[in-house]
Image (spheres, rainbow, N blue to C red):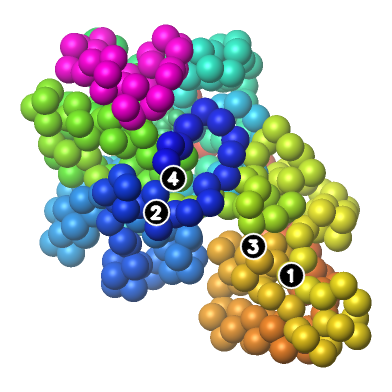
């Protein structure tokens, strides 16, 4: 089984993938972590490597860092929120946050100019991050093409030095055939993930989607050979697109994604027209047989992202399954929830612009 971090395909069998790549089960931590965001509580985050190290830091209140990177390649959608809600959670627990924009990676692998990448990073990602609740306190940000403010040279050299610690055979075993650009992107990401250790953080966590699994494996192989500590990871399932569980939300297919800048009308249209339904073909049949919430995209979005109240979610689940709640009604619940979230969020985006300006002056 192979994952390709640069392609758009959805992952079919997560447990097989986890077994094959030595990813551990996260469910015990998901239960133990206090006040965790829905992504963790409702089992979107299902795997980890070495999370015990981070859990110890949380328990003992010792220092740890979160390192996360954003790929500035398109519009910000619900899927991108899964990472950032976790980052906000750990930041509130006291973690130092390292955040980078992978503008080298977008130039190399997506053919997006540096100027364009910066614009997308600011307008789409950073503005949404702050609007969602990331704080500028205890946060360091850099573009890959600049490197971090401190130890810039060490960072730049790190990806080059990493190349001496691997072989083409190993790279092929991890990634399959890859181009020189992709290899450079992967080694740059290795430097990103190890960088907080240069600033003295020996316990670091990178929350990522399973599409990034290869990078996690590479950096962990290289870390020990380069005399670094092993970085920890959590892995979340990729949020499905509107068209169904076997699709992945992505910026390149607007009819399969909900963007955080979508208008209420657009959201309504997208859910009504595209959101895959687990309901029956006719109302009569639905009332008799009931629907399947597990594959119903409106339900999935409520579960993973929008319905905070466990009891309400359970009621929706049961009513839909029994056929009492119709598809059109379930869709309306989702539309209302998403639109009320977006209304507040889009207002918060205005305030967030000031925070972005401040951050960019600082870095
Ligand atoms: N490759 C990541 C993506 O496609 C972006 C990225 C670059 C990243 N460096 C990172 C993610 C370090 C996590 C940690 O989204």
* 142 and 166: which is toward the camera: 166
Q: SS for tag 4?
A: helix
Q: Name which residue lies at 83% across and 82% down.
A: 286
Where does the magenta region start and end? 160-187
Say above or below: 144 vs 58. above
Q: Is residue 7 left or right of residue 185?
A: right
Q: Earlier in the sequence, mark 3 or mark 4?
A: 4
Which residue is identified by label 4? 210
Q: Earlier in the sequence, mark 4 or mark 2?
A: 2
Q: Marks 2 and 3: in contact by CB < 8 Å?
A: no
Residue 89 visible from this viewpoint? no
Question: Between tags 3 and 2, which lies in front?
Answer: 2
Say which mark, if any, is on residue 16: 2
Q: Nearer the viewer, mark 3 or mark 1?
A: 1
In the displayed structure, 102 sits above or below 5; it is above
Query: Mainly helix, strand or loop, the magenta region?
Result: helix
Q: Are marks 3 and 1 in contact (CB under 8 Å)?
A: no
Instruction: Check disc 1 and report the residue beneath it.
Output: 278
- Count how many numbered circles sit on residues in the image: 4
The earlier-in-sequence mark between 2 and 1 is 2
Q: Residue at left 43%, top 19%?
A: 177
Q: Residues within 10 Å of mark 1 (few under 14, many from 20)?
A: many
Q: Measure the alpha-carbon separation of dots 2 and 1.
A: 25 Å
Residues under labels 3 and 1: Cα distance? 13 Å
Image coordinates for residue 205, horizontal then vertical, percent: 28, 45
Mark 3 or 2 closer to N-term?
2
* Mark 3: secondary structure: helix
Spatial CA span between label 3 and label 4: 19 Å
Work out whether residue 208 or residue 72 is closer to the camera in this orientation and state it.
208
Q: Which residue is mark 3?
A: 301
């Amino acid at each position: 089984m192979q994952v390709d971090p640069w392609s758009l395909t959805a992952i079919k069998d997560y447990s097989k993938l986890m077994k094959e790549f030595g990813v551990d089960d996260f469910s015990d931590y998901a239960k133990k972590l206090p006040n965790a965001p829905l992504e963790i509580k409702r089992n979107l985050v299902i795997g980890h490597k070495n999370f015990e190290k981070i859990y110890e830091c949380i328990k003992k209140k010792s220092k740890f860092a979160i390192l996360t990177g954003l790929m500035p390649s398109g519009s910000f959608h619900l899927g991108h929120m899964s990472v950032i809600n976790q980052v906000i959670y750990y930041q509130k627990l006291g973690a130092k946050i390292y955040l980078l924009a992978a503008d080298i990676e977008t130039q190399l692998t997506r053919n997006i100019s540096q100027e364009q990448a910066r614009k997308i990073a600011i307008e789409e990602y950073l503005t949404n991050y702050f609007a969602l609740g990331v704080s500028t306190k205890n946060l360091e940000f850099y573009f890959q093409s600049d490197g971090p403010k401190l130890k810039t040279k060490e960072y730049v050299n790190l990806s080059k030095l990493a190349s001496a610690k691997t072989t083409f055979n190993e790279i092929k075993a991890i990634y399959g055939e890859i181009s020189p650009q992709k290899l450079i992107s992967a080694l740059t990401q290795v430097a990103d993930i190890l960088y907080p250790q240069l600033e003295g953080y020996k316990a670091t966590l990178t929350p990522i989607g399973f599409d990034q699994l290869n990078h996690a494996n590479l950096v962990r192989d290289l870390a020990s050979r380069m005399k670094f500590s092993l970085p920890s990871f959590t892995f979340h399932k990729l949020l499905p697109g509107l068209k169904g569980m076997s699709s992945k939300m992505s910026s390149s297919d607007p009819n399969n994604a909900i963007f955080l800048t979508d208008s209420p009308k657009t959201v309504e249209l997208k859910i009504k027209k595209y959101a895959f339904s687990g309901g029956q073909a006719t109302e009569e049949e639905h009332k008799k047989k009931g629907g399947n919430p597990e594959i119903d995209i409106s339900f999935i979005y409520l579960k993973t992202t929008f319905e905070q109240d466990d009891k309400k979610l359970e009621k929706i689940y049961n009513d839909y399954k029994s056929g009492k709640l119709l598809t059109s009604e379930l869709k309306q619940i989702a539309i209302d929830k998403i639109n009320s979230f977006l209304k507040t969020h889009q207002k918060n985006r205005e305030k967030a612009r000031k925070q972005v300006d401040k951050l960019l002056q600082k870095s």
